[in-house]
Image (spheres, grey):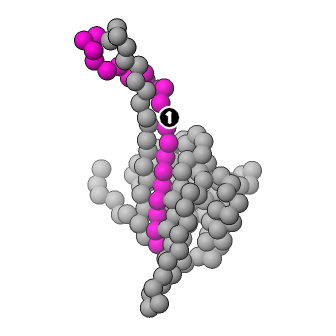
């Protein structure tokens, strides 16, 4: 796989409709997506030579997303703000170029605003998976 442009990694939020439409969260310059699967230790006194044994598929899976950038699009900013203050989960799509799309419900764990007097207003956002996240290869 050839190198990819970071700007092509997209975070999109769903509108909650039955036939869901996704809007790109505007102005995000830096993005990070982390997928985790905790292991469950099944080691016992009967484990061969006292080697650790892990139970496949028994751990908790999670995804976390963070992003930071500048305000550019009032519509997507308003959606993010309303979802945060309602503390409701919303479907998000995480588009990773030449890899795939992760999609599922996420909660906005943190929403931060900042700005210098001689610069632009900026924000950062942190998302945590709140249900099953699916993967579709591109």
- On screen, residue 54 versus residue 57, left or right, reads left
Give the total number of marks visible in the rendering. 1
> Does dot 1 land on a helix, a strand or a loop?
loop
Residue 133 picture location, percent across and down: 55, 42
- From this view, report whether residue 126 is shown above or below residue 63: below
Membership of 57 in magenta stretch: yes
Q: Tell me the residue at 46%/72% (across/down).
A: 69
Q: Position of residue 132 (x, y in %)?
A: 58, 40
Residue holding disc 1: 60
| Region in magenta | 48-70
Answer with the quarter of the image where residue 2 lies.
Answer: bottom left
Q: Residue furthest left?
A: 49
Q: Is residue 138 visible?
A: no
The answer to which of 109 and 82 lies nearer the viewer is: 109
- The quarter of the displayed image where residue 83 is located: bottom right
Residue 121 included in the magenta stretch of the image: no
Residue extending farthest to the top is 46
What x and y, as percent, mark residue 121? 51, 81
Give the residue drawn at x 44%, y 91%: 118
Q: Identify which residue is drawn at 60% across, 42% down.
A: 131
- Say if 53 sits above or below 80 in the image: above
């Amino acid at each position: 796989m050839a190198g990819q442009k970071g700007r092509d990694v997209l975070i999109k939020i769903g509108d909650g409709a039955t036939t869901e439409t996704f809007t790109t969260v505007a102005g995000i310059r830096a993005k990070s997506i982390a997928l985790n699967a905790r292991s469950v230790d099944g080691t016992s006194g009967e484990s061969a030579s006292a080697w650790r044994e892990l139970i496949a598929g028994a751990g908790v899976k999670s995804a976390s997303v963070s992003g930071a950038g500048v305000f550019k699009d009032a519509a997507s900013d308003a959606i993010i703000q309303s979802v945060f203050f309602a503390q409701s989960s919303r479907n998000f799509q995480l588009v990773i170029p030449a890899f795939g799309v992760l999609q599922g419900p996420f909660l906005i764990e943190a929403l931060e605003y900042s700005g210098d007097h001689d610069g632009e207003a900026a924000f950062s956002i942190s998302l945590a998976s709140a249900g099953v996240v699916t993967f579709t290869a591109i």
